[in-house]
Amino acid sequence: MTSPTNSAEPSFRDSVDIMFNRAVALMDLPPGLEEKIRVCNATYTVRFGVRLRGKIETFTGYRSVHSEHMEPVKGGIRFAMGVHQDEVEALAALMTYKCALVEVPYGGSKGGLRINPRDWDDHEMELITRRFAYELIKRDMINPAQNVPAPDMGTGEREMAWIADQYKRMNTTDINGNACVTGKPPNAGGIAGRVEATGRGVQYALREFFRHSDDVASAGLSGTLDGKRVIVQGLGNVGYHAAKFLSEEDGAKITAIIERDGALQDEAGLDVEAISQWIRSNGGVKGYKGATYHEDGAALLEAECDILIPAALEGVINRDNAPRVQAPLIIEAANGPITAGGDEVLRDKGCIIIPDMYANAGGVTVSYFEWVKNLSHIRFGRMQRRAEESRHQLIVDELERISADASIKWTLSDGFKDKYLRGAGELELVRSGLDDTMRTAYQAMREVWRSRDDVQDLRTAAYLVSIGKVADSYRAKGL
């Protein structure tokens, strides 16, 4: 599945600028500050060689810093053949606004390497990743105090572990070396819940949306997530976890899953786990027997459903297909899946869009928790968990003493004791922090959306909140 090539369609970078401009037109920013916030501070392009298969292969990579109103700057590194400077700069800008919206104290950055990871074996990928990291590290484009990457499309825990190890080899006396990247494996300085974080954040975002009945009604829906028909485009890490949690914990029905080689559909609900295993074993959805297969997967973006979750590439919903999209509620799990042109069409139709800078902020939020854990050199929960359990035990003991009195006829409900006595470990604390972040950020967006007559959609509200916070930071610096 590829992004649209319609020349009339704004590019991804243009889309970000259009949406930024739409928001700042509603703000009263001092002269020059609007431009300072909009522009990308710096982009470093590196071309490096690695000897592979008997010859030197040259690769091109980028690291862009959009805003340093707070440091370090934060943003993922993606490995894909479509990586180019404009895309990386647009993603870095989104990271600035995203971090500000969810109150994570970072500026925005992004990186990319133009490579197809499927073309190289594991050892070759390690050599390439380490060389790319070396080129960035020696220029402080990877540093716990200045620039902290994370996984993105085509990268994961493995690549982050290689980068962290490369940094520590080059900075042997930096005690905070593990904090140079986030998204590492748990046994290499990572944090519980990071892999699921972006998909879990999508779930929490939808839960918060459905807590507000008037917002739900604006989308032409009612009730809760239970029974809602959901179409997911892209069953990678984000789409898989979002679909899994929504179906297993909230009662939603995943009625279609769209992948690069087609789509699967079943109005009764798909088995997300079985399909994910099939994709891992077969490289796509084709051949799966438990649902109806559609060769033209993109057509199912236009299928009838309650919630559409684009969770893969940017630009999959655009001016061409937006008029045919039937979903009344779209939540952008990917970065930029709806172009500025598509966004305009959908808004005119009355579709509610939960924007990417909010919806997929779970990843950077939990990355922030991991960075804090690395700097503090202690796992969350280690100091307080057993003390919490001891305090709860006192209450349970007292309740059991009272219930032993024959004159009082009551007992503790089944499972209460075990649940109440279990102190929060790292995973529970991470999920709690993420839930709080997603709730608070949505409420900040919603307040602007519902209180201002000139704000008609959540995306504009999100930009207003985030740009306002970035502007406040610059003002505090004397700009």
Image (cartoon, grey):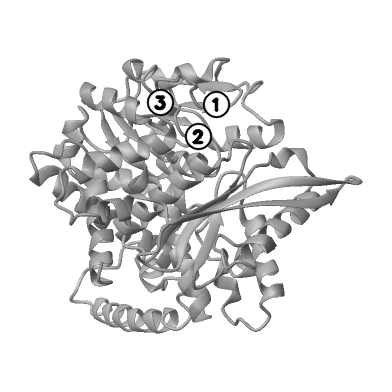
Looking at the figure, which quarter contains the C terminus? bottom left
Q: Do the residues labelled 1 and 2 touch (CB within 8 Å)?
A: yes
Residue at horizontal 29%, vertical 80%?
A: 395
- Indicate the position of residue 210 as horizontal and vertical percent values: 24, 42
Indicate the amino acid at tag 2.
Answer: Leu
Q: Which of marks 3 and 1 precedes in the sequence?
A: 1
Indicate the amino acid at tag 3.
Answer: Ile
Decide if residue 17 is in sight here. yes
30 is higher (above) or lower (below) than 280: below
Farthest residue, direction front: 31
Indicate the amino acid at tag 1.
Answer: Thr
Residue under numbered circle 2: 313
Cα separation, mark 1 vs mark 2, equals 8 Å
Label 3 Cα neighbours within 10 Å, binned few <14 / some 14-19 / many ≥20: many
Quarter of the rendering containing residue 12: top left
383 is higher (above) or lower (below) than 189: below
| 82 left or right of 454 in image | right
207 is higher (above) or lower (below) than 190: above
Looking at the figure, which quarter contains the N terminus? top right
Decide if residue 379 is in sight here. no
- Indicate the position of residue 302 as horizontal and vertical percent values: 39, 18
| 235 left or right of 80 in image | left
Residue under numbered circle 1: 2
Residue under numbered circle 3: 317
Quarter of the rendering containing residue 96: bottom left
Which element carries disc 1, helix, strand or loop? loop
Q: Which of marks 2 and 1 precedes in the sequence?
A: 1
- Indicate the position of residue 262 as horizontal and vertical percent values: 57, 21
Which element carries disc 3, helix, strand or loop? loop
Viewer-nearest residue: 336 or 250: 336
